[in-house]
Amino acid sequence: NKKIVHIELGHVLTDEKRWLLLGSLALCWLTLAFLELVTQSNSLVSRRWLVTGRVLGATLLIGCGLLGGALDTGWILLFTTVVCTAQIVLDVSWQANIHHT
């Protein structure tokens, strides 16, 4: 049972582990922002909020990566969970606006 990254609460993540976690998630959000930006849609609801939210989320994750050397693993995981949950809420609210209009 091998793990790529073993994260223990109460410890500080090494730079490599911190950037693997936060950098990969930020890259995912930036990729989704790009796809939202270039995707054609017949919807009357603007995708601008989705793109802005994705870029903001990625920026926050990168900022946490830059400042995260001083943060406990639990705080990094909590912050990451909040950012990802906000992305899901943004998606659900955008989908609700599409079906409502």
Image (cartoon, rainbow, N blue to C red):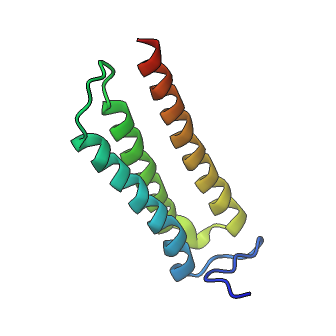
The quadrant the C terminus occupies is top left
* Residue depicted at 37% across the width and 50% down the height: 32
Left/right of residue 61 with respect to residue 14 in the rendered view: left
Spot occupied by residue 71 in the image (x, y as percentages of width and height)? 63, 67
The picture quadrant where one finds residue 39 is top left
Front-lying residue, 39 or 31: 39
Position in image of residue 94 (x %, y %): 45, 27
In the image, 64 versus 47, the foreground residue is 47
Q: Is residue 46 left or right of residue 22?
A: left
Farthest-out residue, top: 101
At x 56% / y 67%, what residue is drawn? 68
Furthest-bottom residue in view?
Answer: 2
The residue lying at 48 percent from left, 61 percent from top is: 25
Image quadrant in which the N terminus is located: bottom right
**Count of numbered tags:** 0
Q: Which quadrant holds residue 2?
A: bottom right
Where does the image place residue 65, in percent across and percent down from the top left? Answer: 49, 66
Would residue 53 be found to the left or right of residue 3 on screen? left
Up-down: is 89 above or below 4?
A: above
Q: Is residue 73 above or below residue 81?
A: below
Q: Residue at x 63, y 77 (%)?
A: 13
Name the quadrant containing residue 80: bottom right
Q: Percent position (x, y) of residue 76?
A: 63, 62
Q: Is residue 3 left or right of residue 29?
A: right
From the viewer's perspective, is residue 20 above or below residue 32?
Answer: below
